[in-house]
Image: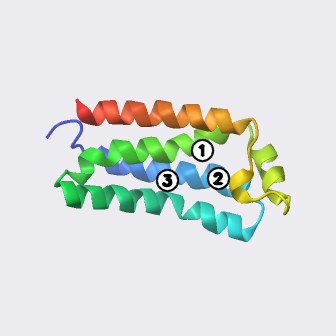
Amino acid sequence: MSLQDSPLWWLFSMAGAAIWFVVMLPAMPTRNHKIFVSIGPPTVFAVIALYCLKSDENLTEMLPVYCGLVISVPVGILGHRKALREMLADPEVPYGEATGPWTLQAAVSLAVFLGLAVYYVSH
């Protein structure tokens, strides 16, 4: 068993999802926002699982990509939760147009975490 195939990745995946919920849910001002944000980790997992089924990849070996995606979003809003919450609380600002100082931070964290995960699984 290689390190990439380690069952620890299941633990890391659960921890990543827990971090997602701990950081993201308090940043959401309404019940609908919380519901929308709650589907993130299961959706990412479903997409990766479907990819693994289609391509005959080992799901455990692809969990670092799941972790990278799920961790990048909460890291992307760290330090900006209050501003994000206030922006989303404004009913005149559509969810998809809620941008602020967290936008660049989220993009960079996504690129870094996903890049590292893809590099890890490809080697």
Question: Which residue is at the front of the view, 88 or 97?
Answer: 97
Secondary structure of the residue carrying tag 2 is: helix
Tag 2–tag 3 contact (CB < 8 Å): no
* Residue drawn 59% across the image and 38% down it: 75
Dividing the picture into quadrants, the one containing residue 104 is top right
Residue closer to the observer: 18 or 31: 31
CB-based contact (under 8 Å), mark 1 and mark 2: yes
**Kind of residue at disc 1:** Pro
Q: Which residue is mark 2?
A: 24
In this rendering, position of residue 105 left or right of residue 47: right
Would you say the residues marked 3 and 1 are in contact, meaning their CB atoms lie under 8 Å apart? no
Looking at the rendered image, the quarter that the N terminus falls into is top left
In the picture shown, does residue 46 fall above or below 118?
A: below
**Residue lying at 67% horizontally and 38% vertically, measured from the top left:** 103
Vertical relation: 47 (above or below) 68: below
**Local crowd at mark 2 within 10 Å, few (<14), some, or many (≥20)?**
many
Would you call the spot at circle 1 few (<14 residues within 10 Å), some (14-19), or many (20 or more)? Answer: many
Q: Can residue 78 be seen by looking at this rendering?
A: no
Q: Percent position (x, y) of residue 25? A: 66, 57
Q: Earlier in the sequence, mark 3 or mark 1?
A: 3
Q: Position of residue 112 (x, y in %)?
A: 48, 30
Residue 1 appears in the picture as rendered: yes
Residue for badge 3: 17
- First in residue order: circle 2 vs circle 3: 3
Q: Which residue is mark 1?
A: 74
Q: CA distance from mark 1 to mark 2?
A: 6 Å
Amino acid carrying label 2: it is Met
Distance of label 3 from label 1 (alpha carbons): 10 Å
- Disc 1 secondary structure class: helix
Q: Nearer the viewer, mark 3 or mark 1?
A: 1
